[in-house]
Amino acid sequence: MSGCSDCDTCGPAAARPDDKYEYMVALAGNANVGKSATFNQLTGVDQEIGNWPGKTVERAEGLLQHRGRRIRVIDLPGIYSITALSTEEQVSREFIAHDHPDVVVNVLDASALERNLFFTIQLVELESPLILALNQMDLALQKGIRIDTGKLSALLGVPVIPTVAIQGKGISALSDAIVHAVQDRPKPRSIPYGKEVEDRIGKIMELLPAGAGGYPPRWTAIKLLEGDPDTVWEAKKQAPGAVAAAQAYTRELEKIHGEPAGTVLSGERYHAAERMVAEVMEIHTPGDQETPLTARIDRLALHPVLGYLLLVLTIGGLLVWTFIIGAWMSELMTSYLSGIAPIQPLAKGSAADILFAGVWTGLVAALTLIIPYVIPFYLFLALIEDSGFLTRFSLMLDRGMHKMGLHGKAIIPLVLGFGCTVPACLSCRIIESPKQKFLAAFLVTLVPCSARTIVILGVVAAFVNIWWALALYLFDFILIVILGRIAFRVLPGESVGMIMEMPDYHVPSIPIVLKQTWQRTKSLIWIVLPAYIAGSIAITAAYAVGLLEPINTILSPVTVLLLGLPLWTGVVFVFGIIRKEMTLLALAAIFGTTVFSTIMTPVQLIVFALVTMLYVPCISTILALAQEFGWRRALGITVLETALAVVLGAVAFRLLGLVL
């Protein structure tokens, strides 16, 4: 910017002292270069769409939150020049020149670099702090185009970042460049034209006062040569001599070249773009032998059909492990450990026996969760993460996650939730926005973990049929989507987009995978094991001395009248606070049978499983939530989900009674 726009007193930072954003960045570029995809990757779900003041042109803006910086990103209309002939061009020109964005990110199509540089050169003439996002590098690669981004950066004097915005590649590097640029404000180097034109530009600049028209002197001189009516009108008020001289020089250029001055200047820009492209670009015969392995695999992993099929197969394999192999291992371990000592609440006996029963029951609950479910799950997660597939899956699901106010990274805790809710809650810390982090944790607590799976399979699938068990899962997923959309609108705070660098594929390192699996498992053990043992001791002891029996009476208006369940299920739900499958052990201990169809009707079994699936997260999950978000929010989730479970259970009891 001309004048003092870069100083601390009246520069861009000082212009917005009360703005809730630290910096402002504009995205500019031709149409169909991937500018919107870049904008979506940078800002994610936190976007506002409206019109520019007094214009019918759409205005999109969003929040980029990266490395501790809060940056407002404005997506300018897609245009090919800044001549102010159209409303879109006028909006972009006025915003860049007068609103003083801290940085302009010029998005270019790498496969059509010369054509796109025509617009870049005009941005350089505006002397805007500039970053080039060289997008669609994959398309350029397919065409055999190689671009030396370092040399291009040196020619222009600004950062040049290669990206494939639609795949999320280079977005992290672009975000880093933006954070650095809003502080360093890289000013592009002036691009010289032919001697005839340059001499006349220089002479006009000498006649212009500083800050004439609010534009840089070189920009104003060029526009006067082109006969731009807005520039001529503004300059006449401050520098009539410069306008008269420019008009004389315009006539000279038109006489020399035999065409309008505007055409001459356009030709100069294209010649400058052509010279740059000749220095930075090489064209080879495209072929797979030159295509990197990562790009070839991405054709499958990020394919709009095959990519989702691969994703479904991967998550399907994970669920098969959870539902079949993990459940079989857990049952085998439970059977073996029950041979050592009974795994159930002890209602009478010595204090030592009751204490041992509580410790043993909690220990078995922890072991049968961690060994068959958590360790294999973490191992599998580390394998796909280290190979590079996990970030691709996150990207594939990014748009779907937006429906719940989240982004692709949230798939990691949500998938973790199928194994255990505790590590899933802890993994929400990878999400940058506090609002999205809490929203993800809330939804994670509703995912049917392995313990809930045991209840659903052991109660509904075993004694009603598998279709009703699957219906419970489907209902749960629909509920997660609906509650996610509601919570996103209700929760205060802002959301940010997904910024994830796309690593190259490689064979996973076994030592790294094992170390990562152990580190995650170890951190989980320190929460789960003490919580299970302490909770089991407390509830078993209370049960043994008869303190839990009055709970049946207290809860009977809910369990009996609203939910239509047997009276003793009140105590059973209390045991479920330790771990959800403890409800099955408590049922067996209280009623003396594992054939639950003899103590409850099919409707009661479905309602029991539904309520167990939704009510109070287990004690270790509550501790994890408290650790991450504080006790107030942890208890808020607990109360909300308990109320939700009761309401939906009551409705289900009455509706199912009409069907079954």
Image (tube, grey):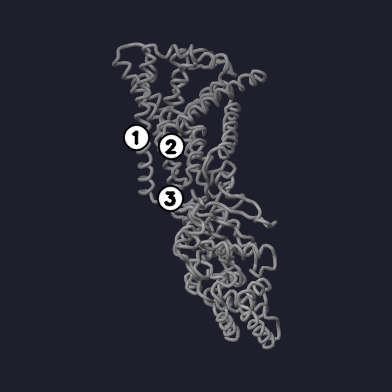
Q: Quadrant of residue 526?
A: top left
Secondary structure beneath dot 3 equals helix
Percent across and percent down for residue 65 are: 49, 51
Judged by depth in the image, the label closer to the viewer, 2 or 1, is 2
Q: CA distance from mark 2 to mark 1?
A: 18 Å
Q: Secondary structure at mark 2?
A: helix
- Residue 425 vertical placement versus 67 (above, below): above
Which mark identifies residue 526?
Answer: 1
- Residue indicated by mark 2: 629
Quick check: marks 2 and 3 in contact, CB under 8 Å?
no
Q: CA distance from mark 1 to mark 3?
A: 25 Å
User: Could you tell me if the residues under marks 2 and 1 are in contact, i.e. CB atoms within 8 Å?
Assistant: no
Compare marks 2 and 3 and give the one earlier in the sequence.
3
Q: Is residue 587 left or right of residue 124?
A: left
Three-letter residue code for mark 1: Trp
> Residue at position x 41%, y 42% from top?
379
Q: Quadrant of residue 635?
A: top left
In percent of width and height, residue 17 lies at 49, 55
Give residue 218's position: percent from left, percent from top: 56, 76
Choose between 508 and 401: the one closer to the eye: 401
At a point 40% along the width and 38% down the height, the residue shown is 375
Judged left or right of residue 632, residue 359 is: left
Residue at point 60% right, 50% down? 48
- In the rendered image, the quadrant that contains the C terminus is top right
Q: Give the amino acid at mark 3.
A: Asp
Q: CA distance from mark 2 to mark 3?
A: 29 Å
| Closer to viewer: mark 1 or mark 3 | 1
Q: Which mark, residue 386? A: 3
Q: Nearer the viewer, residue 73 or 612?
A: 73
Rendered position, 159 above or below 512: below
